[in-house]
Image (cartoon, helix red, strand yellow):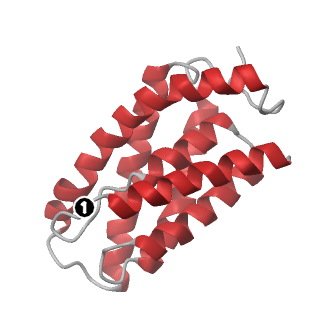
Amino acid sequence: MNTRNLVVLALLAGIGVVLHTVMPSFFGIKPDMMLAMMFLGIVLIPEFKSVMLLAIVTGVLSALTTGFPGGQIPNIIDKPVTALVFFGLFLALKKYRNSVVSVAVLTAAGTAVSGSVFLTAAYFIVGLPNSFALLFSAGVLPAIALNAITMIILYPVALSIVKRTKLSTASVIQK
């Protein structure tokens, strides 16, 4: 893990915090825009140590900015689980993982996993203020759409920047 990669991951986490902070909540749950930045970091720097560092940092930062009552622990649980699932799926799709469509679909799937893990953890730890289905519909489904659209826009830009700056020699996004 080199310094440039750490700087990129820190920038993505910072952008994610801003997005997570300004996003309004619906029925007590915010669409988690920080996930898109975490997923982008995983796609750009697909190294296990980087993935875990980004997941832990993202979990702590989203716990600090959550609007969900008692959502701190569920956020800290959800991000590493989601990052590992996303990373595993990303590695499994060697042939297709560099396309914008694949990255957007992975982002949508990862967001669904994250929302499910978060709501399940919240249910068992603090209880849910509304039904699981309502919270999933109001918070997770919009996040799936927003994160996929965000990734469709940001991934080609980030890929272009990475190629021009030779950001990471370990990156597997090189064709």
Seen at 40% across and 54% down, the residue is 19
Residue 60 visible somewhere in the drawing: yes
Task: Name the foreground residue: 31 vs 94.
Answer: 31
Q: Quadrant of residue 32?
A: bottom left
Q: Is residue 72 above or below residue 46?
A: below
Q: Position of residue 15 (x, y in %)?
A: 51, 51
Q: Position of residue 127 (x, y in %)?
A: 27, 83
Seen at 80% across and 43% down, the residue is 4
Q: Is residue 166 above or below residue 79?
A: above
On the picture, is 173 further left or further right than 150?
Answer: right
Seen at 61% across and 32% down, the residue is 92
Q: Name the residue type under label 1.
A: Pro
Q: Is residue 53 above or below residue 96?
A: below
On the picture, is 131 further left or further right than 101?
Answer: left
Q: Find disc 1 in the rendering and name its residue.
A: 24
Task: Name the foreground residue: 64 vs 121.
Answer: 64
Check disc 1 and report its element: helix, strand or loop: loop
Seen at 24% across and 48% down, the residue is 141
On the picture, is 63 further left or further right than 29?
Answer: right
Q: Position of residue 131 (x, y in %)?
A: 14, 70
| Quadrant assignment for the C terminus | top right
Instruction: Find the residue positioned furthest to the top.
Output: 175
Q: Position of residue 90 (x, y in %)?
A: 58, 35
